[in-house]
Amino acid sequence: MANRLVVAFKHVGDAVFVVLLSVVLLCLSTGCALPTGILRSRWAMDDPEYAEKYAKGAKKSDVLGKLKQAADARFMADASGMFVSGGVTQRTNNDEGMLALDIGGEHYLSSYLTGRASLMGMANSDDWFTGVDTGLRLQTPTRLAPFVGLGAYAGFASEEVLADDDGKDNDDDGRIDEYREQDEVFSGAFAALYPEVGTHFWWTPGVRLTGFGRYMVSTEGRDSDDWMIGIGVAFFNNPFTPSPKIDTLQIEPVEVP
Ligand SMILES: [Ca+2]
Ligand SMILES: [Ca+2]
């Protein structure tokens, strides 16, 4: 019982750590400002593409029009960005979860589909895995955007072992088999495929917050499958090409003789 409480407190501690980390990141990235245009329905006028589209906003009486411009995030199609995210896993067969941290890039293939790839580290007090993570997410093209996704993670771990009797200078310090010489060796791999659900929220037209849950189906067997709950912040750059203005057709007056 007491042991379970300790474990529970540890997980709460992990979650608090991740939340605090994201608050700090958010503050650094947005100057601790409130979400852009949260009191206006044309929320993304800082973005040239959105501003062009909604230059003429919906009339006061046009409630649907107001809702549409408050939700619209279709202008993100073809935007690219960088993200940082962190998460915790809860293993069912193991009291100790893992902390994960990843940094990567994401691209809007269309307004409702993104692809991403990142470098990701996963660690607890026993293991440290360094790996790559990649995935696709299908989402609504809106400011608050629920999504479903599929992803894959592949990582490997290494450990230090005693190497003072193999005739090699394993640590490149110029001495062979010196007292307590160590070597770093491959100690294991970990890979997982996962379905995920989550939601994005555009804090500004360039800063996006994300919360997600993944069910990690691992190569270590069904006993090692676990949920990863995480959050992230991403910074996007949205290229803009002004749409060509169509000149009004000029009709030359024809003189009637
Ligand atoms: Ca040496
Ligand atoms: Ca050696």
Image: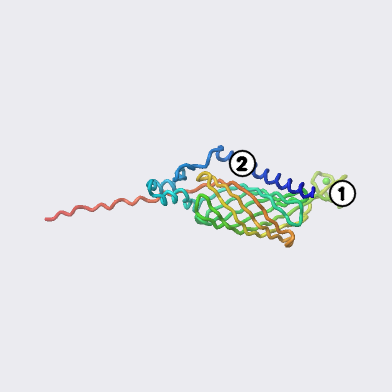
Which numbered circle lies on residue 164? 1
Q: Nearer the viewer, residue 46 or 198?
A: 198
In the picture shown, does residue 38 fall above or below 133? Answer: above
Which numbered circle lies on residue 23? 2
Q: Residue at x 41, y 47 (%)?
A: 54
The extreme left residue here reads: 257
Amino acid type for the residue under numbered disc 1: Asp
Q: Marks 2 and 1, Cα distance to the nearest angstrom?
A: 47 Å
User: Where residue 32 sits: x, y (%)?
Assistant: 56, 38
Tell me if residue 56 can be seen: no
Tell me if residue 115 can be seen: yes
Amino acid type for the residue under numbered disc 2: Val
Q: Nearer the viewer, residue 132 or 193?
A: 193
User: Where residue 161 sits: x, y (%)?
Assistant: 83, 50
Point out the image quarter for the C terminus.
bottom left
Question: What secondary structure is marked by label 2?
Answer: helix
Q: Nearer the viewer, residue 225 or 207?
A: 225
Colour convention: rainbow
Q: Is mark 1 within 8 Å of ligand 2?
A: yes
Q: Residue at x 86, y 51 (%)?
A: 167
Question: What secondary structure is marked by label 1?
Answer: loop
